[in-house]
Amino acid sequence: MIPAPTSPNTRSTLRWRIALLVSAAIVLSYLDRQTLPWTLSQIHADYPFSDQIKALFDSAFLIAYGLMYLGGGWLLDCLGTRRGFLLVMIFWSLASASQGFAANYGFAPIFGISFALIMLVASRCLLGMGEGGGFPAATRVVAEWFPVNERSTAMGIINAGTAVGAVAAPWLIFLVLNYTGWFGLAPWRWVFFLSGTLGLLWTVWWICDYQPMDRHPHLSDAGRSKIVSGQKSSAGESSKTIPLAELLSHREVWAVVGAKFLSDAAWYFYMFWLPKFLMETFQIKFNAATSVGWIPYAASGVGCLVGGGLSSWLLRRGASVNRARKIALGASVAFMPWVMLVPQLHSIGWVIFIFSLAFFGQQSWSTLVMVLPTDMISKRAVGTLAGLVGFGGAMGGALLGQIVGWLRDHGYSYTPALVISGSMHIAAFILICLVIPKIQPLKILTNQ
């Protein structure tokens, strides 16, 4: 079949349309993971639980997410982006919907935890397993479709989906909670059913619109050559997957993974605990929390675009990859320590402003860290390295989440958690600067 002719303008914007397609998947990812934090008060009314159990929900998601982030990177390297992304989206959409079926079903509690809560833990675990392949897939799309000097901008667009999903979550959940309850089912269950349905609808878009760059019917030979010419040379490069042990033999890999461990510990604390923090600290109801709780997430979306855009701008101005990435990373870190002031503030407006700074800086930082795998190794292992980086971040989030849950159940305020989270990005930046003096391709890996 001969593809329909396309205009030069269409061909030149094709890769950015693909970035938006992937960004839509990340929107759904962050919508799905935010459904539980914003429905906790409604679920708690049916099935009471402690803060340690709340932390268990988060840890179940993050541990599975981290392990499958690592496995998902390997899966994407083996199956390819098109088939691999389709598989993980179907899996996580069904897992998201499964949370709506949590109930006791006449079973007795296990270890003092009701069967409904155990089902929620299991569903969060499955959701984490599915979503673990999302960002490795996104990283592969960027490596396949974008030249080096556009990658951080493309990743910024994709990563902005995290903010769109998180901003949309409280408003969509508010609508569902107030206007559903169909068939006698609690409205909070419909939050999960509908979020899963949206993911399955995205897979239809993906099947219809995505093809690998080297055989996309709407990309001309000239457009393909332009993309390839701006990528790292792969002449003579083997197609064999690089073993995980080989990746781990390089200290630069450990530095990026360690930096993600530190910075994402703070990020997942903010993301999973902010709704609860606002409602408890200011004694406000769900409706009031949703009216302001979306603002930091909106700021995070701006951060995605600014961080990636700054790095790309520096590259266009002649800066090296090392200088462009580190300047943008350092600028991002400058926004993070201010969150330590939150315990001293008694105005919800100022608290939201400070959290907005932190969310802005975090997602600017995250965009750049997720670009580093494309700067350091060849496409044949970029999914695996992206998976390692995500694994480190998820483990950091699980650890800090458990610490916060224990502290809260033992009478501590949020102050220790805010002090710890406010210092994490500084430590991560120092780690990158010390261990990776120059961001560049790992020669042993790329020359194998």
Image: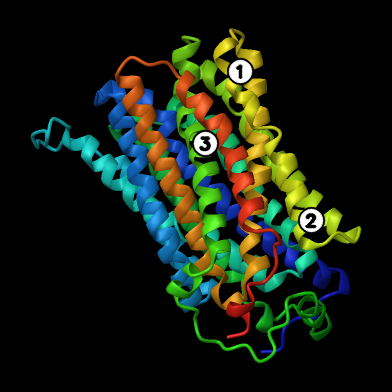
Q: Amino acid at mark 2?
A: Arg
Q: Is residue 417 left or right of residue 96?
A: right
238 and 113: which one is in front? 238
**Circle 1 SS class:** helix
Total marks in image = 3
Residue 183: horizontal and vertical position, in percent? 30, 35
Q: Amino acid at mark 3?
A: Ala
Q: Residue at x 45, y 59 (%)?
A: 69
Q: Are marks 3 and 1 in contact (CB under 8 Å)?
A: no
Q: Residue furthest bottom?
A: 236
- Establish if 93 lies above or below 223: above
Residue 130: horizontal and vertical position, in percent? 40, 57
Q: Is residue 117 left or right of residue 99?
A: left
Whether residue 71 is visible to the viewer of this picture, yes or no, is: yes
Quadrant position of the N terminus in the picture: bottom right
Q: Amino acid at mark 1?
A: Leu
Q: How far apart, in angstroms, are the residues tagged by discs 2 and 3?
A: 25 Å
Q: Residue at x 38, y 50 (%)?
A: 127
Viewer-nearest of labels 2 and 3? Answer: 2
**Circle 3 SS class:** helix
Q: Which residue is mark 1?
A: 341
Determine which quarter of the picture holds residue 158: bottom right
Quadrant position of the C terminus in the picture: bottom right
Decide: few, some or many residues near mark 2? Use Cα within 10 Å; few <14, some 14-19, many ≥20: some
Decide: few, some or many residues near mark 1? Use Cα within 10 Å; few <14, some 14-19, many ≥20: some
Q: Earlier in the sequence, mark 2 or mark 3?
A: 3
Q: How far apart, in angstroms, are the residues tagged by discs 3 and 1?
A: 15 Å
- Establish if 16 lies above or below 106: below
Q: Which residue is mark 2?
A: 323
